[in-house]
Image (tube, helix red, strand yellow):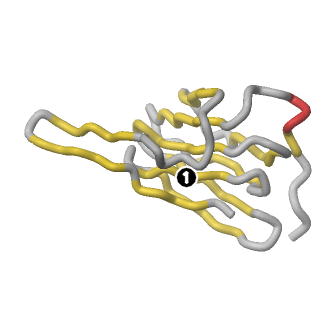
Amino acid sequence: MAKLIILSTFSDQRGNLTVIEKQLPFPIKRVFYIYGVDNSVRGGHRHYKTIQAAVCIHGSCRVNNFDGKNKESFLLDNPNKCLILETSDWHTMSNFSKEAVLLVFASELFDPKDYIFEPYDD
């Protein structure tokens, strides 16, 4: 089941520094980011092995998630919000604001055989 965590952020007159350290439930093997999204819906899959952590580091987007039992919707609108997506989480990303940048950390290297595109039955 997806879980939202709040990342440690240190703020002063110079700005903000957000840290991801010992908070992710996996070692990071891959990092990618999504940006320049029009009105399209991204994602639309889950994984056999990969766990992901998503942070919208600029702007905002919505992540809709269904783990086969529970449907949830998460608004990622602050770079201190990190959404952990488990292997069972069939997810889509949408409603990207202009200039949004969604940064994703993954537990596995890219493998096209790791993707399950068929959604769960409601």
Residue at the spot 91% in from the left edge and 33% down from the top edge? 113
Of the 4 image quadrants, the one containing the N terminus is bottom right
Residue at the spot 55% in from the left edge and 52% down from the top edge? 83
- Residue 67 is drawn in which quadrant? bottom right
Which of these two is toward me, 122 or 32? 32
119 relative position to 106: left or right: right
Q: Amino acid at mark 1?
A: Leu
Residue at the spot 87% in from the left edge and 56% down from the top edge? 119
Q: Residue 19's x, y, as percent?
A: 36, 40
Q: How many marks?
A: 1
- Residue 69 is drawn in which quadrant? bottom right
Q: Residue 20's x, y, as percent?
A: 42, 41
Of the 4 image quadrants, the one containing the C terminus is bottom right
Q: Name above or below for residue 110 compared with residue 6.
A: above
Q: Name above or below for residue 16 compared with residue 110.
A: below
Q: Residue 52's x, y, as percent?
A: 64, 43
Q: Name above or below for residue 51 compared with residue 120.
A: above
Which of these two is toward me, 18 or 79? 18
Secondary structure of the residue carrying numbered label 1: strand
Residue at the spot 18% in from the left edge and 44% down from the top edge? 11
Disc 1 target residue: 83
14 relative position to 94: left or right: left
Crowdedness of circle 1 by 10 Å Cα count: few (<14), some, many (20+)?
many
Residue found at the very far left of the displayed protein: 13
